[in-house]
Amino acid sequence: MGGEPLYLAPRLGRGLRSFLESPGLPHLLADGLGSPLDVVVPEQLAANVEQFRSVYGRHHLSGQVFFAHKANRSSALLRRLAATDAGVDVASLRELQHALGSGFTPDRITATGPKNPEFLWLAARTSVTVGVDSLDELEQLAVLGRKFAIPRLRVLLRLSGFEASGVRVLSRRSRFGTPMKECETLLEAVERHSDVIDLAGVAYHLDTTSVTEKATALEGCLRVLEECRGRGLRPSVVDIGGGFGVDYLADGEQWERYTTELTAAVLGTRPPLTWGGHGYGLRNEAGTLRGSLGLYPAHRPVAGPRYLDELLAHPAASFGGRPLAGLLLEHLYDLHVEPGRALLDQCGLTLARVLEVRTQDSGGELLVRLAAKADDVGLEEHGVLVDPVVVPRDPARAAAGPVAVHLFGSLCLETDLITRRTVFLPRRPEPGDLLAFANTAGYCMDFHATHAQQQPVARKVAVWQEGGAWRWCLDDQYWPTASMGGVGYDMGGAQ
Ligand SMILES: Cc1ncc(COP(=O)(O)O)c(C=O)c1O
């Protein structure tokens, strides 16, 4: 197998673990509904909202948690969310329609991202809060407001290009939002359109894991709010977007070891760890390591609500080093967050049937073909390296010990790789077994799903526990009445 197995075991919460360990349940569902199959756990989403809420409580902050809908298309998840006190951040016309139809009232919806005219119109007409992406969008909104005599529209101004005072720390470049240096023009437009536009606050979303960059942006927003007050405007919201992250791995040491060995493999000092010499951004230039590892930091002990906690405790350099939370509280500003991935932590998994297992060439690695396409399991696309769990068809089968495998999809394309890396599994998978890819609900389930080669896209089921038994229904049949004491199919006592 080429050395010790390099596992990247998934972090499995109680819910996902119990589902996978329910005798026969994953196979029963995949037999009936096909492979791939997406499984979502709506109750976990409600629990995750509570975790974010508790951070607000700890810092005595008010405001709203908005789920970034783009991370998953599920109706079950959205409908369950509607039964909590959270809101939803929608980024397209269809997402807005979905939110309205799932039970969200407009005061619990924020429309973000650049918008086409239809999306902007429905957002305006239904009076949801609009995260304005540019001056042009603000002007369009003002025209709509006047033309259709819509009540004053609540807007958040999305800003970008923040700069820390003193040291030159620039926040990441973004093609979204209005650059800070154009903020003045934007505020003038808000004043000009005050008959139809109501400035609720300011916003940012940064695609970075850096707390410092986000703190710089939050400070920038606080300064803009001060300036607004100086102009007689009364905005009270700071929306800090999403990007709180997820810890995908059970064991941080495995991650350290894996990345060290991957580097060695790129340098040629150990056997390869990927298909076709892929380096995940690293390359060997005449014995020197170049490039940078283009991977999601799969081991992130400070992720989700803990990341928010850390950001809020971060000292604001331009406000005398006081913690950001204290500054928000002092001004009675509402804090809005828009987590996508983090709110979906442990909310789902993707099952894929093993179709074929064979050996090829030297190396001893097994080629495993799955009844799923790379698009159906977006972990690799998102740079998240985590092992699947083997769910054997026959649990009594003797485990034969660790194997190294390459996981391929079902498309007739060389590039249809479920993983580019060699995956180490504690037991050899056999045709008929299932591989369970845990924690795919955030972006890795349906974000990239296609009908390529007329292969089916995954069906989706919602699962929940009732009286110790798992119950399920098709995603679009789910309403909160099900998992909160209503109807569902009993799995015949599967525990
Ligand atoms: C405006 C906005 N808010 C929230 C999010 C959600 O980010 P994440 O899923 O990383 O929390 C995104 C992601 O692209 C976004 O663009």
Image (cartoon, rainbow, N blue to C red):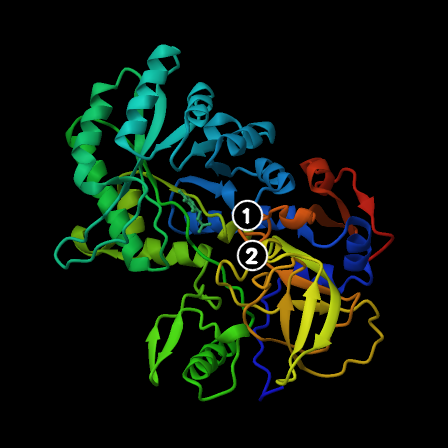
Mark number, residue 275? none
Quadrant of residue 351 within the rendered picture: bottom right
The answer to whether the residues at label 2 and label 1 have Cβ atoms under 8 Å apart is yes
Q: List x then y, in percent, for residue 304.
A: 46, 56
Q: List x then y, in percent, for residue 3.
A: 58, 89
Helix, strand or loop at label 2? It is loop
Q: Quadrant of the C terminus?
A: bottom right
User: In the rendered view, does 492 fall on the left or right side of 54?
Assistant: right
Label 1 crowd (10 A; few <14 / some 14-19 / many >=20): some
Q: Looking at the image, is 441 positioned above or below residue 63? A: below
Residue assigned mark 2: 378
* Rendered residue at 54%/31% (across/down): 94
* Rendered residue at 33%/75% (across/down): 290
Residue assigned mark 1: 447
The amino acid type, in three-letter code, at marker 1 is: Phe
Instruction: Choose between 99 and 61: the one closer to the eye.
Output: 99
Q: List x then y, in percent, for residue 67.
A: 50, 42
